[in-house]
Amino acid sequence: MQISETPFKFPQNTVEIPEVPSFEEEISSDRPWQGFDEKDPPEQNVIDSCVHCGFCLSTCPSYRVLGTEMDSPRGRIYLMDAINKGEGALDETAREHFDSCLGCLACVSTCPSGVQYDRLIAATRPQVERNQPRNWGDRFLRAIIFNLFPYPLRLRFLLIFLWLYQTSGLYKLVRSTKILEKIFPRLAAMESILPRISLANIFDNDFPEIIPQKGKKRYRVGVILGCVQRLFFSPVNEATIRVLTENGCEVIIPKNQGCCSALPTHQGQEKQSRELARNLIDSFADTNVDAIIINAAGCGHTLKEYGHILKDDKQYRSKAEAFATKVKDINEFLAEVGITAKLSPLTDGELSVVYQDACHLLHGQKISLQPRQLLQQIPGLKLKEPIDAALCCGSAGVYNILNPEVADELGKQKVENLLKTKAELIASANPGCSLQIFKHLRLQGKDIKLMHPIELLDRSIRGLKL
Ligand code: SF4
Ligand code: SF4
């Protein structure tokens, strides 16, 4: 379909503002009217399935922090409806309300009417990117993010400079003087989630292409290494591979695999998202695996959406659908096939662990019992539950860089709730959540271990104490 280059304009004198008080306040009549373009706008029948009951409001993190209707799922659906019908404009204000959505999908889990808000926001984001220009600061930051984060090789070079920045102690000066915060607060937000960078993680994170199983072969599985996971949390990938091979899985790791496209997909960068998805599908062609395993929640959710992302690509549509059906989160896969390796206690006594639900596992993939069941199989491990377990930690991909104020409030609340359980260790199955929680533990002066559930299973299989 051809994208219209001139945004469609509605004549001002025919515009009627819908009778929704908070919406009336926010949509003024003196700006040029501009609707969604004709390429995949949010579907009207999905918009119409919202009965405006408001059940979703209390579970929405942006509404909880900002407190405005237009920053809630219902408010955004009103906004999409108005823009779709030519009664509202896709302008800067509308963009801010769509940008404030974390894409956590808590509203999808909550909605009693089954409104597919995930489909709506996924269709809206590319519309925003195409039709609502951003200021230079925003464009600059996004250019850094989209040109670096999805490319492990480029990220690797940047990490060398960041390693020097950390080892020279310069970061202490930057943080204590708050100089970056004053000049470019969102770059400071990016700097603030940097974990301790290790040279080993930067250079020593490659694996053989085929890793044999231990004992009798049960499955042949592919493993996706991820971008952030590969460079910041390489031990999580190592643990994933060991646990799989210990449980009778032959592991295939295609050398040429790149980014899964989660980051550009969540931000409405359609072209880049499709290109990366096609590349990843190609890298797994002919591997003949039973399942494709991922250990990062956000990536897993995107990988399972490949059929939708490439729905208009005649050459790749069916390949994308076939690929997506094979994708399994590591917790989901192990819970399904069962752990055959012997598990040992991680401490001499009891170990209390609080599991932190990643939104793209809990809401996006409906995976919440599996990681808990796996952890509870470890002898001596006692699981604790935090309050507000289903509320986003504020990481949400790069949301904590692009919208640091809201993200910081959510991060602070999440860490307080995790700490209130008095658990000795936090288990988190998403690298973005882990970075966000590390940051807020540091800000609250708390020193508590945080590990991926697969690292705990790995240690338990290897008989290693914490
Ligand atoms: S999205 Fe669902 S829960 Fe929220 S207002 Fe609409 S119908 Fe109600
Ligand atoms: S995806 Fe999350 S932040 Fe966005 S409207 Fe739904 S609950 Fe709110």
Image: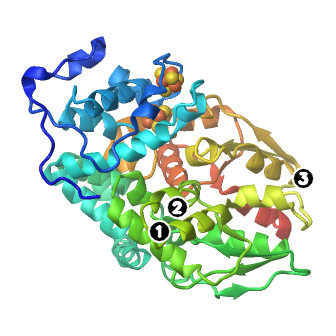
* Circles 1, 2 touching at the beta carbon (< 8 Å): yes
The residue tagged with tag 2: helix, strand or loop?
Answer: helix
Rendered residue at 55%/52% (across/down): 434
- Whole-percent x and y of residue 301? 56, 54
The residue tagged with tag 3: helix, strand or loop?
Answer: loop
Instruction: Say few, some or many: other residues with alpha carbon within 10 Å of mark 1 (under 14 / 14 to 19 / 20 or more).
Output: many
- Tell me which amino acid carries mark 1: Ala
In the rendered view of the protein, which quadrant contains the N terminus?
Answer: bottom left
- Tell me which amino acid carries mark 3: Pro
* Circles 1, 3 touching at the beta carbon (< 8 Å): no
Mark 3 CB within 8 Å of ligand 2: no
The residue tagged with tag 1: helix, strand or loop?
Answer: helix
Mark closest to the chain's N terminus, 1 or 3? 1
The one of 255 and 76 positioned closer to us in this rendering: 76
Q: Is residue 27 visible?
A: yes
The one of 398 and 466 positioned closer to us in this rendering: 398
Q: What's the colour scheme? A: rainbow
- Whole-percent x and y of residue 140? 20, 59
Instruction: Say few, some or many: other residues with alpha carbon within 10 Å of mark 3 (under 14 / 14 to 19 / 20 or more).
Output: some
Q: Nearer the viewer, mark 3 or mark 2?
A: 2
Name the residue carrying label 1: 277
Mark closest to the chain's N terminus, 3 or 2? 2
- Tell me which amino acid carries mark 2: Tyr
Q: Which label was assigned to residue 306? A: 2
